[in-house]
Image (cartoon, rainbow, N blue to C red):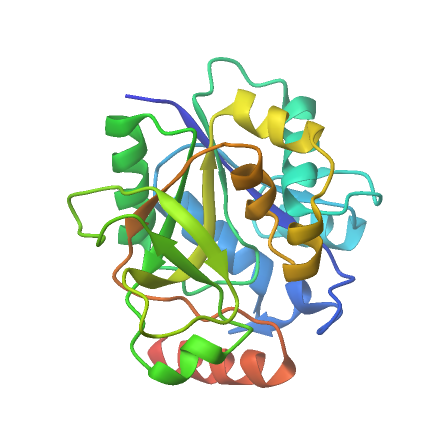
């Protein structure tokens, strides 16, 4: 069994919704909800990588663990690699980068991804779900991944592109879920590369890996978690989670 660690990048200065990690649902911050979910998977140790002492204090107060990182990072990948180096962990086979703004992520989907990386040993593993509404094809807030083959629960095909807008006539298009499982040496390699023009233009850091010939395998997720990018997202998710609690 491969050894994995879950690292969650988080910062207060989000462009569209500043302060969102500390917005509360059922009296607990969004970031601490994500930490709780990550711990429930029993995949490995869980740490938040943050540039903000307020986030670190909140995570610690709610029983989690956090590492303070530089404020100069341009991407979440850079932040979690600093966190990984500071932790000085031994014999870790995969670093799982979990988004800090998706508190309703499905635990079974995370476990499924972990199962596939244990079997297939990819350079990078990620997840995607079926697109259930044609309006999503042109919604730039929903990242799409195109895979070489149709994804099933049994296979783990290679991604051939990531886009924000796509033609719905293309086959094997899925709603990308921004969870990544990196081999540590691959993450180190990625952050050594300069950001690419395509990555910056599309605001998709996974394109840096692809343009440097690093393969990304994609697991099928059962559901697409609701990410919190706007106040409307937060209020909708708050209503949903409070109703289900």
Foreground residue, 244 or 227? Answer: 227
Q: Is residue 169 left or right of residue 178?
A: left
Foreground residue, 151 or 17? Answer: 151
Residue 238, position as x, y percentages in the image: 50, 79
Residue 214, position as x, y percentages in the image: 49, 32
Q: Residue furthest top?
A: 91
Q: Is residue 103 left or right of residue 17?
A: left
Q: Residue at x 79, y 49 (%)?
A: 53
Residue 162 versus residue 71 in the image, above or below = below
Q: Residue at x 74, y 36 (%)?
A: 194
Residue 40, position as x, y percentages in the image: 36, 47
Foreground residue, 140 or 232? Answer: 140
Image quarter hosting the N terminus: top left
Q: Residue at x 34, y 38 (%)?
A: 42
Q: Residue furthest left?
A: 154
Residue 40 versus residue 31 in the image, above or below = above
Residue 120, position as x, y percentages in the image: 27, 28
Q: Residue at x 63, y 47 (%)?
A: 9
Foreground residue, 204 or 235? Answer: 204
């Amino acid at each position: 069994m491969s050894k994995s660690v879950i690292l969650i990048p988080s910062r207060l200065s989000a462009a569209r919704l500043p302060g969102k990690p500390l917005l509360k649902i059922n009296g607990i911050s969004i970031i601490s909800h994500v930490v709780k979910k990550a711990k429930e998977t029993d995949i490995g140790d869980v740490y938040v990588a943050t540039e903000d002492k307020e986030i670190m204090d909140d995570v610690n107060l709610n029983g989690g663990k956090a590492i303070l990182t530089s404020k100069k990072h341009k991407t979440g990948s850079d932040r979690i690699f600093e966190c990984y180096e500071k932790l000085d962990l031994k014999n870790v086979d995969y670093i799982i980068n979990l988004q800090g703004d998706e508190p309703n992520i499905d635990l079974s989907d995370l476990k499924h991804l972990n199962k596939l990386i244990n079997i297939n040993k990819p350079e990078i593993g990620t997840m995607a779900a079926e697109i259930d509404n044609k309006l999503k094809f042109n919604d730039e807030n929903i990242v799409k991944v195109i895979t070489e083959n149709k994804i099933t629960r049994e296979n783990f095909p290679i991604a051939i592109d990531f886009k924000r807008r796509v033609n719905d006539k293309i086959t094997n298009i899925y709603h990308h879920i921004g969870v990544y499982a990196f081999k540590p040496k691959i993450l180190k390699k990625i952050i050594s590369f300069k950001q690419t023009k395509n990555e910056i233009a599309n605001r998709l850091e996974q394109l840096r890996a692809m343009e440097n010939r690093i393969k990304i395998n994609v697991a099928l997720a059962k559901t697409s978690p609701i990410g919190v990018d706007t106040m409307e997202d937060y209020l909708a998710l708050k209503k949903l989670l409070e109703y289900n609690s």
